[in-house]
């Protein structure tokens, strides 16, 4: 059996709502990957439409994780950052990247900042500027269109989009530093929704779409990015990993819609994990 791969995941954790580490850990674990976690904040629930949530910033605790892991001489196949709870955390994560980056591993930054043209309540304009600096150190970034606009310091543009606009956006985001860029929330018509990826080394652009389901479903960005990383670390090329992640995420949304579950509560990703593992060749007879 091949040596198990290990990643460092730097995300918040919400007690309720199926997002961040509560989806990152099970999806990557199902993909056969060991996950070491650095929580950036603890919340009673995610902040999207769920009032009166409790929130604790863990900035003061994060450096202790990095210090001990360095002393243990831990090695990682990927470093994966998501939502950051304060501006000061950007420097901590940047230091972590410098500490644990090797010639053979991979840095993915999901620049979690906002949606629908608006920053999340806990994200400041200063943090958005700092996130662009963090993306300089990434091999792959996975923004939505809101986050792409803030990274580039320009106005958010609503869809439907054109291929020319999207592919220009991909190249300009890659010019920030990352060799690969994947943008989520891509749509050309009202019935299809998906993602697009770009590799600067090959100039290849690849799209993946699925049937759009009405509604706003929380946590799907974390699910998509985690499934994408699962595919990459299991040997898939970027185009196939994007398709895997798009199909998995669409299945989660469809399952939740058919069950008429409150969309604020997150999507049913759990029921799709067995098929997901099969697609990755993880399951044993």
Image (cartoon, grey):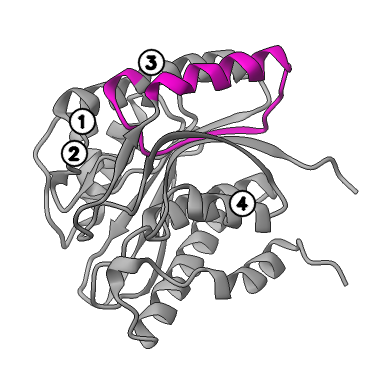
Residue at 20%, 43% in the rendered image = 120
Q: CA distance from mark 1 to mark 2?
A: 5 Å
Q: Which image quadrant: the C terminus?
A: bottom right
Q: CA distance from mark 4 to mark 3?
A: 26 Å
Residue at 68%, 65% in the rendered image = 277
| Crowdedness near tag 2: few (<14), some (14–19) or many (≥20) residues, C-alpha within 10 Å | some
As drawn, the label of residue 149 is 2
In the rendered image, the vertical position of residue 170 relative to residue 63, given as above or below: below
Question: x and y percent of residue 148 in the render?
Answer: 25, 40
Disc 1 and disc 2 in contact, CB within 8 angstroms: yes
Residue at numbered disc 4 = 28
Magenta residues, start to end: 59-88
Mark nearer the N terminus (4 vs 3): 4
As drawn, the label of residue 106 is none
In the rendered image, the vertical position of residue 222 relative to residue 61, given as above or below: below
Quick check: is 75 in the magenta stretch?
yes
Q: Nearer the viewer, residue 256 or 61?
A: 61
Mark nearer the N terminus (4 vs 2): 4
As drawn, the label of residue 91 is 3
Q: Nearer the viewer, mark 4 or mark 2?
A: 4
Residue at numbered disc 1 = 152
| Crowdedness near tag 1: few (<14), some (14–19) or many (≥20) residues, C-alpha within 10 Å | some
């Amino acid at each position: 059996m091949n040596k198990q791969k290990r990643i460092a995941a730097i995300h918040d954790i919400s007690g309720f709502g199926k997002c961040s580490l509560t989806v990152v850990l099970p999806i990557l674990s199902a993909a056969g990957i060991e996950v070491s976690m650095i929580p950036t904040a603890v919340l009673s629930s995610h902040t999207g439409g769920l009032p009166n949530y409790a929130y604790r910033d863990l900035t003061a605790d994060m450096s202790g994780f990095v210090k001990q892991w360095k002393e243990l001489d831990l090695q990682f196949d990927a470093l994966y950052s998501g939502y950051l709870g304060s501006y000061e955390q950007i420097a901590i994560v940047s230091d972590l990247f410098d500490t644990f980056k090797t010639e053979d591993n991979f840095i993915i930054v999901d620049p979690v900042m906002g949606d629908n043209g608006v920053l999340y309540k806990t994200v400041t304009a200063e943090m958005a500027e700092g996130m662009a600096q963090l993306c300089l150190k990434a091999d792959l970034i996975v923004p939505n269109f809101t986050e792409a606009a803030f990274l580039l310091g320009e106005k958010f543009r609503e869809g439907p989009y054109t291929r020319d606009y999207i592919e220009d956006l991909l190249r300009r985001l890659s010019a920030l530093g990352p060799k690969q860029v994947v943008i989520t929330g891509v749509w050309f018509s009202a019935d299809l929704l998906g993602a697009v990826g770009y590799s600067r080394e090959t100039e290849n652009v690849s799209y993946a779409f699925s049937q759009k389901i009405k509604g706003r479903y929380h946590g799907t960005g974390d699910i998509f990015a985690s499934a994408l990383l699962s595919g990459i670390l299991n040997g898939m090329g970027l185009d196939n990993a994007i398709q895997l992640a798009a199909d998995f995420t669409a299945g989660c949304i469809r399952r939740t819609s058919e069950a008429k579950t409150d969309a604020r509560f997150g999507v049913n990703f759990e029921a799709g994990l067995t098929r997901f593992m099969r697609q990755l060749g993880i399951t044993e007879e």
